[in-house]
């Protein structure tokens, strides 16, 4: 019988180095525009032109392969075209961070010392609460939806956090992230290895550049193929693995509007910021419908906030079916479970009605805002025993 449980004594640097020294074969990436230092780079314009065509499943397969069997990381150049929206969002984020500091609720984060960086938790909901129009413009992005579906399938849940790396801030230590990247080795070892491997398929990690990121500003340091090491959740704190990371990890410069997507099991670290300006990224954690998201988001509240704007856009013929589905997928809760099946019986396809379907139905039938709000509140209550 094969072993199913392992501990930190089982990690092996040679096995890890073998995986990380794999070569990348360009023939596996026919849609990419470039490959740099084992990172697959795509042109946002080309991705947008394929999304709604029959080739989209081939592209989805390629992206999934890249994150799983490939290097585990890819960059999409100009994934976000609306620079004004990015700048507006940055301005709002900075305003919230300032306010939170005044109210003394700023607490830094788990991987950096205080003063080295600033972190805004739940930037998704906070942006929507302050400026729903900018929020819609930001999350109406078809690339974000496409990448999320390529890794996780439908009904994913987006959460986001802003990270500002201050001038002079040191590089982070390499690590893996949510879920098991947050647990101590002793706890990780209690999970069977199949659960540890599964963990990577529950989250897609992304970083959207809100500033240009030259190498001296410290863009994310990454070690291609390191996500494939099955014992990696118990290895990233080990000094020999840290040394290997230091010697072999790479960085790719990014421009404002570029997005990096990575397998959450990839060994990575924020780089040293040697410039005199802040390096600002909105970090995206997309959760599978089958997993628990990193942050709790009041999705009923933000869906109610965006509905009047979407309805107005629709009435002025500025909102197509695809756009409303994209924003709905990024914001509203598309997965109806957990629920109370006594109060919320199966509706369609053996599943109860969900918030995303409700949003699409309301928009297609031009429901008044009051009707939509009442219906969504009632639907939310029906989910709770
Ligand atoms: Fe991280």
Image (cartoon, grey):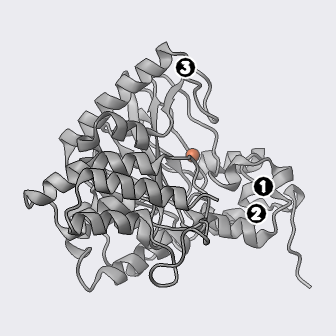
- Residue under the point 50% across and 67% down: 335
Asked whether the viewer can see residue 241, the reply is yes
Which numbered marker is on residue 234?
1
Cβ(mark 3) to ligand 1 < 8 Å?
Answer: no
Cβ(mark 2) to ligand 1 < 8 Å?
Answer: no
Asked whether the residues under the numbered discs 2 and 1 touch, taking CB atoms below 8 Å apart as contact, a structural biologist would say yes
Q: Earlier in the sequence, mark 2 or mark 3?
A: 3
| Residue 39 position (above or below residue 135) | below
Which numbered marker is on residue 115?
3
Specify the farthest residue to the top. 102
Q: Earlier in the sequence, mark 3 or mark 1?
A: 3
Residue 139 percent location from the top left of the image: 31, 52
- Residue under the point 54% across and 67% down: 289
| Residue 293 position (above or below residue 129) | below
Looking at the rendered image, the quarter that the N terminus falls into is: bottom right
Which residue is denoted by mark 2 in the rendering? 231
């Amino acid at each position: 019988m094969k072993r199913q449980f392992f501990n930190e004594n089982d990690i092996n640097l040679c096995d890890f180095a073998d995986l990380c020294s794999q070569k990348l074969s360009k023939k596996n990436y026919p849609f990419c525009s470039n490959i740099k230092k084992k990172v697959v780079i795509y042109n946002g314009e080309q991705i947008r032109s394929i999304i709604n065509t029959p080739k989209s499943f081939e592209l989805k397969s390629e992206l999934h392969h890249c994150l799983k069997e490939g290097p585990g990381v890819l960059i999409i150049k100009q994934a976000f075209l609306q620079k004004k929206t990015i700048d507006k969002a940055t301005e709002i984020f900075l305003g919230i961070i300032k306010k939170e500091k005044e109210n003394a609720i700023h607490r830094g984060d788990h991987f950096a010392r205080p003063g080295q960086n600033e972190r805004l938790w739940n930037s998704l909901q906070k942006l929507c609460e302050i400026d729903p129009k900018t929020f819609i413009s930001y999350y109406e992005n078809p690339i974000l939806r496409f990448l999320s579906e390529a890794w996780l399938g439908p009904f994913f849940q987006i959460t986001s956090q802003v990270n500002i790396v201050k001038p002079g801030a040191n590089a982070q230590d390499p690590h893996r992230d949510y879920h098991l990247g947050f647990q101590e080795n002793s706890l990780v070892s209690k999970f069977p290895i199949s659960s540890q491997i599964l963990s990577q398929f529950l989250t897609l990690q992304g970083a959207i550049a809100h500033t240009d990121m030259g190498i001296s500003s410290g863009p994310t340091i990454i070690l291609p193929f390191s996500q494939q090491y099955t014992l990696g959740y118990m290895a990233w704190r080990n000094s020999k693995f840290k040394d290997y990371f230091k010697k072999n990890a790479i960085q790719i410069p990014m421009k404002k509007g570029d997005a990096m997507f990575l397998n959450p099991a990839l060994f990575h670290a924020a780089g040293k910021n040697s410039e005199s300006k802040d390096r600002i990224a909105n970090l995206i954690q997309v959760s599978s419908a089958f997993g628990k998201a990193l942050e709790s988001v009041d999705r009923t509240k933000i869906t109610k906030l965006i509905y009047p704007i979407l309805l107005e856009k629709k009435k002025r013929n500025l909102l197509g079916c695809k756009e409303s589905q994209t924003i709905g997928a990024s914001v509203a809760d598309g997965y109806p479970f957990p629920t109370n099946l006594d109060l919320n019986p199966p509706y369609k396809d053996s599943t109860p009605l969900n918030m995303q379907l409700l949003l699409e139905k309301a928009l297609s039938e031009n429901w008044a805002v009051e009707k939509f709000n009442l219906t969504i509140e009632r639907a939310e209550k029906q989910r709770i025993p």
